[in-house]
Amino acid sequence: MSALPPPAEKAAAVRDMFDRISPSYDRVNRLMTFNADQRWRRELVRRLGVGPGDLVLDLACGTGDFAEICRKAGATAVGLDFSRGMLNAANRRFPGLGIFVQGDALRLPFADGAFTVAVSGFALRNFVAIPPVLDELARVLKPGGRVGLLEVDKPRNPLVAAGHGLYFNRVVPLVGGLIADRKAYRYLPQSASYLPPEAELRAMLEAAGFARTRKRSPMFGAIQSVSAVRT
């Protein structure tokens, strides 16, 4: 049975879902990935060369993981998310910072060329459409600015793919449902169907104004870590 909402209802459904699961989101993420999600974020931030002097946009920031990693690297970071529940959780984790903003990835409330780096973790499949989000990222990045995207992926090795499919499509919904929200953790594995193939994502990035796209595949190809540079 599909847990994916009709296209016209996707934005509202995704926002409501993340509002619901925000109190337990970090705990479930750490459990499901054996805490590896933080390692993948740190590795991508290193690849992007984030450091002092950078102003970073953490798009679909959730509870602020990427923003915090970038701050520890010496950068200034701003987090934006569609979900008020997620932003409330971020502000509870990092009280007093005032760096988290509610907004829509399709209409970013920032000036052209405002940022030197943009990152986003496990969010592409939750957007209503990916190309306009990439267009907006290109708009708010300075020329030469870097973008980094983390997402799930399909392992190419058949044995790894079989094991991953069992875990991602069976275990994740079961455990997530027991701990947090059954409907949400049925949606999250199924939402991988929204992701374009590698060549198509690369073409989307190029069409938006990015070049030098690079992809790494941690967790035996179950995760994709993509970087590119704004032309």
Image (cartoon, rainbow, N blue to C red):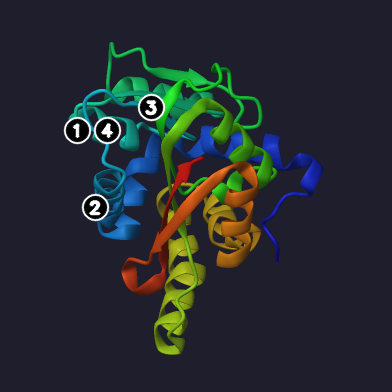
In the rendered image, the residue lying farthest to the bottom is 159
Secondary structure beneath label 1: loop
Q: Estimate the x, y position of residue 5 in percent, counting from the top left.
A: 73, 49
Judging depth in this view, the residue of 137 and 122 nearest the camera is 137
Residue neighbourhood size for the residue with mark 2, other residues' Cα within 10 Å, grouped as few (<14), some (14–19), many (≥20):
few
Residue drawn at x 59%, y 55% as measured from the top left: 187
Q: Estimate the x, y position of residue 166 in percent, counting from the top left.
A: 46, 77
Q: Which mark is residue 89?
A: 3
**Mark 4 or 3, nearer chain start:** 4
Q: Quadrant of residue 27?
A: top left
Q: Estimate the x, y position of residue 13 in percent, counting from the top left.
A: 67, 39
Report which residue position mark 2 lands on. Answer: 39
Q: Is residue 95 above or below residue 199?
A: above
State how far apart marks 1 and 2 are (Cα): 14 Å
Residue drawn at x 28%, y 49% as measured from the top left: 47
Residue neighbourhood size for the residue with mark 4, other residues' Cα within 10 Å, grouped as few (<14), some (14–19), many (≥20):
many
State how far apart marks 4 and 2 are (Cα): 13 Å
Residue type at mark 4: give it: Cys
Secondary structure beneath label 2: helix
Q: Quadrant of residue 112?
A: top right
Secondary structure beneath label 3: helix
Report which residue position mark 4 lands on. Answer: 70
**Mark 3 or 1, nearer chain start:** 1
Determine whether label 1 and label 4 are within 8 Å by CB: yes
Report which residue position mark 1 lands on. Answer: 73
Residue 220 showing in the rendered view: yes
Q: Mark 3 or mark 1, which is nearer to you?
A: 1
Residue drawn at x 27%, y 36% as measured from the top left: 50
**Mark 1 or 2, nearer chain start:** 2
Judging depth in this view, the residue of 157 and 18 nearest the camera is 157
Residue type at mark 2: give it: Arg
